[in-house]
Amino acid sequence: MHYVVSILLFYLFWMLFRYDRLFVQDPVGHRYNYLILMGYALLLLFFLRTYNAHLLGYSRIRTLVVAEFLSQFTSIAFIYLSVTLGWNKLRSPLPFVYMLIFQSAWDVLWAYFGNKIYFSLHPTRKTILIYRNELDKKRFGSISGKPCERLYHITDELCYPGNSFSEIRDRLDGYEAIFVAGVHSRCRNGIAKYCKENNVPGFFLPHVGDVIMQEATHIQSFDSPVLYVTRKHIRPEYRVAKRCMDIILSLLGILILSPIMILTALAVHFYDGGPAIYSQDRLTRDGKVFRIHKFRSMRVDAEKDGVARLSSGEHDDRITPIGRIARRFRLDELPQLFDILRGDMSFVGPRPERPEIAEEYARVMPDFHLRLQVKAGLTGYAQVYGKYNTDPYEKLEFDLLYISHMSLLGDIQMLFATLMTLFSPDSTEGVEDGKINAMTYENNEGDQRDLYAR
């Protein structure tokens, strides 16, 4: 319903944009109008899916409204630029501005009442959380305070370090949903089958092995089903297309954003007299070291003790006032457009880690190097769906998910999805005070090794 009304609103304001009135007798022109309407419908559908704008029941009203607005704004921007170039004439975009105002009011109403209707149609499910140890329980986190808490209310918890599903089978009766974190694979497989057989929703935290198997290919040369897994080999046509996209978009970005970059550089330099740009060694594909460039957001002597450490966010006194603004709106990342143009990075891929921090992660998590199968990127799954201080194990899983599903269309979606992070302050949340990296469980290294080795 929201999608249909949005398309009708666009058509009304498109008529105002083209004819300055709603109803016009123009049989030939209406074919063009219908073509534009179809284009807008396809663009809107693409962006609604990119921003998860129709995820009722699982997203806050504010998140839904922002996602819907971004979907409509970007779709209209594409249409406006296309017709302006096609007509070779600049027309006032004011009708589309009015449309966005009306559309935003409709978005708020739909998100508010849509969530209410969704919750009324989907009563709260009695849910059990099954976990192996306290670290796994902590990793799963809590849904308290989130919209989905109204859908899945955890009434019971079961700590089960064993591997036999039969021992806990009877404990599952009566529950309408199951959350699973870290249990042994044999038991977990039993729970998954139980969910299938009894039509019970199951939510499983994946292991790295689960994510790797998503990339497996069915080989039909054997009498038995065989899944083939190897290191990621990127198709030549995708590699060429991805590199061309990187070159074109980085050049456009440098051209369009150069005034903002100049102003940011001047602000950083004149605040304390230090250099505007700083560079660091980072890791990219196959462990190759390159120099990444950013606008400096910290004091010049931020690491005078020689220890490589992540930022602790807004409480980090090393960050300058200018740096806080630059980080909030991702302005500090803009010099990486030149790194992308040189070929050291790509727009989409695993974020490059510092060698010292990557070594710390690999010490307790040897699989961390698997994210180096592809070139490092400016943005990726971990940046869009996680945040700055996401645990490295989860960051690895995000990056492997991206590597398993790499495609040009997916890269384009990820670029647009990154815009949503500008409206989420949590995405730049730093590590806890006193910590040098994002390891969540560094105070219990034995259990941590067990967790990361799965």
Image (cartoon, helix red, strand yellow):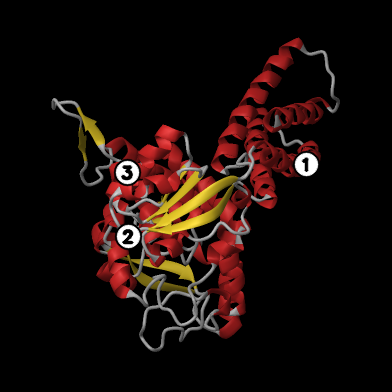
Q: Nearer the viewer, mark 2 or mark 3?
A: 2
Residue that appears at 44% across and 62% down: 137
Asked if residue 108 is positioned above or below residue 379 in the image, the reply reads above
User: Label 1 vs label 2: CA separation?
Assistant: 47 Å
Q: Which residue is mark 1?
A: 109
Q: Residues within 10 Å of mark 1 (few under 14, many from 20)?
A: some
Horizontally, residue 204 falls left or right of residue 425, namely: left
Q: Nearer the viewer, residue 321 or 93?
A: 321
Quadrant hosting residue 145: bottom right
Q: Residues within 10 Å of mark 3 (few under 14, many from 20)?
A: some
Give the SS element for disc 2. loop
Q: Nearer the viewer, mark 1 or mark 3?
A: 3
Asked if residue 306 is positioned above or below residue 428 in the image, the reply reads below
Q: Nearer the viewer, residue 313 or 136?
A: 136
> Which amino acid is tagged 2?
Pro
Tell me the tag on residue 189: 3
Residue that appears at 37% across and 54% down: 397
Residue that appears at 62% across and 39% down: 54
Q: Nearer the viewer, residue 152 or 391?
A: 152
Where does the image place residue 292, in percent across and percent down from the top left?
39, 66
Instruction: First in sequence, mark 1 or 2: give its number.
Output: 1
Quadrant, the C terminus: bottom left
Residue lying farthest to the bottom in this orientation: 305
Where does the image place residue 229, in percent across and percent down from the top left?
21, 42
Tell me the tag on residue 161: 2
Give the SS element for disc 1. helix
Asked if one can make out residue 407 in the rendered structure from this viewpoint, the answer is no
Q: Residues within 10 Å of mark 2 (few under 14, many from 20)?
A: some
